[in-house]
Amino acid sequence: MFHFPYRTLAALAVAAGMLPSLDAAAASPLPAPAQDVPAASVKGPQTAVFAGGCFWGVEAVYRHVKGVTKAVSGYAGGNAKTADYEMVSTGMTGHAESVEVTYDPAQVSYGELLRVFFSVAHDPTQLNRQGPDYGSQYRSAIFFTNDDQKRVAQAYIQQLGQAKVYADPIVTQVGPLTAFYPAEAYHQNYLALHRTQPYIVAHDLPKLAQLKQQFPERYVAMQ
C-alpha cells in the first residue's frame, strides 16, 4: 500500500468542510503570449517541463490538451540519486514534482502550453506550495530545454506581471532543465485511475473543468 499522508489528510479535511479548497475558479483565460516559438522554427515532437504543485493535476491537465501526445509525472531540479518520491517529499533534494509534456508544435505552441500552465494548471503566486501542499518540491517552475523556451517563458511572466492579472506577484522560477526523471509507475495517469479519491475531487478535477471551460477549442476528452 502506498501512503500519501499529507495530501490525503488535507483532502479529507476539504471534503469534510474543515478546510476550504484553495483552487479558486478563474473567470476567463489569460491573454495569449505576445511572444511564442514559431512552428516553422522547430521540427518534430517537442518537450516542455512544468512544475506546479502535485504532479497528478498538472499531468492530467496536459493529457487533455489537443496537440499533446504524452504527459509524464516526474522530478526535475535534483539529481538521479534522489529522484524518488519518498526522498523528494522531504523537500531536501532540490527536485520539484514536475511534468514532462511531449507535444506537436503544429497543433499547439509552447506559448499556448504556458498559457494553460498559468491559467488553469496551478496558481503561480504561491511560493513553495500549491493549495494544501507545502515545500519546495511543490514550487512553481518552468524548466526550459532551449533558448527559445527560456525567452518565451520569461517574456510571458513579464507580460502577465505588467498586466497585473494576479493580485499577488508571480513567483514562478525559470531555469534550465538538466534532467527529468519519470516518477514511479503508480503516479502515472493518477487522476484517470483515481477519480473519486478525495484529493483529486477537491483539487484536480476542478482544473479539468476550468480547462474545458476556458479552452474549449483545445480540450480533448482523453490523451
Image: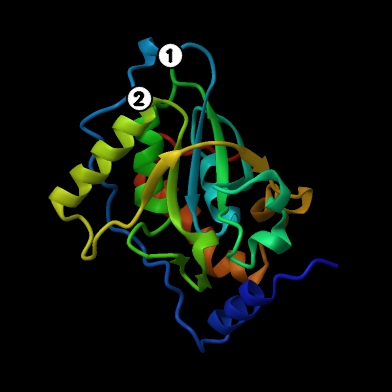
Pick whichever of labels 1 and 2 is earlier in the sequence.
1
| Disc number placed over residue 129 in the picture, else none | none
Q: Could you tell me which residue is drawn at 38 percent across and 50 percent down?
A: 173
Image location (x, y in percent) of residue 142: 43, 43
Circle number at residue 42: 1
Residue 159 visible in image = yes
Where's residue 171, x and y in %? 32, 57
Check if mark 1's residue and mark 2's residue have beta carbons within 8 Å.
yes
Q: Position of residue 88 (x, y in %)?
A: 65, 60
* Tag 1 secondary structure: loop
Q: Amino acid at mark 2?
A: Asp
Q: Nearer the viewer, residue 212 or 105?
A: 105
Residue 181: quarter of image: top right
Numbered disc in front, either 1 or 2 = 2
Label 2 CA crowd tier, 10 Å (few <14, some 14–19, many 20+): some
> Relative to 16, is 94 above or below?
above
Rendered residue at 52%/50% (across/down): 58
Q: Is residue 13 found left or right of 150 in the rendered image?
A: right
Q: Amino acid at mark 1?
A: Val
Residue 148 tag number = 2
Residue sitting at 21 percent across and 44 percent down? 158
- The local crowd at label 1, few if under 14, some if 14 to 19, many if 20 or more residues have their Cα within 10 Å, is few
Q: Quadrant of residue 125?
A: bottom left
